[in-house]
Image (cartoon, rainbow, N blue to C red):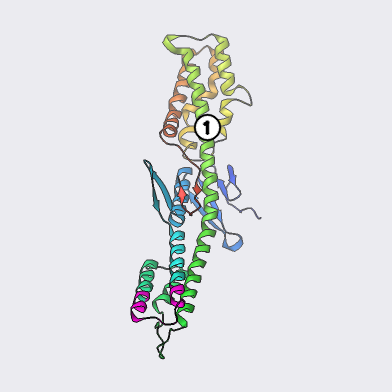
Amino acid sequence: MEEPRVDFEVAQKISRKMLVDPDGALHIFWGEGENRQENTLSDLNVAIRQGTHVIERYQGLVEKIKDEELILPGEARQMSQLVGELQRIISRFLETREISSVGAGEIRAEFERISKRIGQVSNEFKLRAKGRVVTMPSLIDEQGRKNTKVPVRAGEAALDLLRRFDEISEKTWGTILRTRRLVEEKMRIERIIVAVYNSLGRFLKNFENGQSPDQQTLKRIASQMVGNSANLMSGLRTIKVQPYLRERIQSREIKRLGRLPAYVKQGRIDSFRRALEGAFLKLRPVVQEREARRIKRVTVSDKGQVKR
């Protein structure tokens, strides 16, 4: 497939259609060729929230409250329910040779309920289905027999709603995959930050109670932070997206870690300690946020709802 053509330098490629620019903004593409569209989002969290909202709107949501599950059905489930109701009406209409006036009234009332449940819509398939239900012909023809046009019209309405169901499935599947990939990137970033944070905490233990580490210890700490290709700063430099880029990775406190080897050579132990402490405090909010909530993969149940 053709790669999206962009007018900015790509700082990170999260996936083929999810790119990060040098300012840390996300550019998400969908569609192909002339139908390709681009959505620019300010940061990773906004993109995850947007994707989750779309999935919940269409596929529904299952939220666990204590020991019980709250199910909020999405549009896909609603379409499935409406199709089932239309099929039951068709079966009821066809199962007897004649239909009483009471039975006809009940079926007509069911059609009216279905029309109300479809609601005020703009989608072409739902509009078409509602139009067929609202203009349903009389259940009894001029000869007093069941009108054979009724099950045909109801079947056409059910088919329209099934087409809307397919349309929703196509839309949400791509959103599910994108959102899952974004959540995975967020988890990767947080793992890196937590690893650096924990290492900084261990390094700072050497300065507790006014202690002054020896040169060998300072060199070892500086080497682990910035001294070789597998250092901790290398992990931080792979983080290119907001809200982590400017506020954390490009901050003065994190950049100061690059001076640790110079501080060792110059004997500036207090500056060395302050650099570690400043970076530790700068990363702390990310670690606290991670501890306060647990990111889960976006999943869809067998019934089509999102589970958090």
- Relative to 12, is 216 above or below? above
> At which x and y percent is residue 202?
50, 18
Main secondary structure type of the part rendered in magenta: helix
Mark 1 — residue? 191
> At which x and y percent is residue 192?
53, 31
Q: Residue at x 43, y 74 (%)?
A: 92
Crowding at mark 1 (Cα within 10 Å: few <14, some 14-19, many 20+)? some
> At which x and y percent is residue 60?
43, 54
> At which x and y percent is residue 210?
43, 9
Q: Quadrant of the N terminus?
A: bottom right
**Residue that lies at the very extreme toward the bottom in this rendered image:** 143
Task: Choose top left, top right, bottom left or bottom right for residue 118.
Answer: bottom left
Q: Residue at x 52, y 22 (%)?
A: 199
- Relative to 265, is 295 above or below? below
Res 225 seen here: yes
Q: Quadrant of the C terminus?
A: top left
Q: Which of 249 and 230 is in front in this view?
A: 230
User: Which element carries disc 1, helix, strand or loop?
Assistant: helix
Q: Nearer the viewer, residue 270 or 282?
A: 282
Residue type highlighted by circle 1? Arg
User: Can residue 177 be found in the magenta stretch?
Assistant: no
Q: Residue at x 47, y 20 (%)?
A: 201
* 64 on left or right of 216: left
User: Can residue 103 be found in the magenta stretch?
Assistant: yes
**What range of the chain is rendered magenta?**
89-107
**Residue that lies at the very extreme toward the right in this rendered image:** 1
Res 10 seen here: no
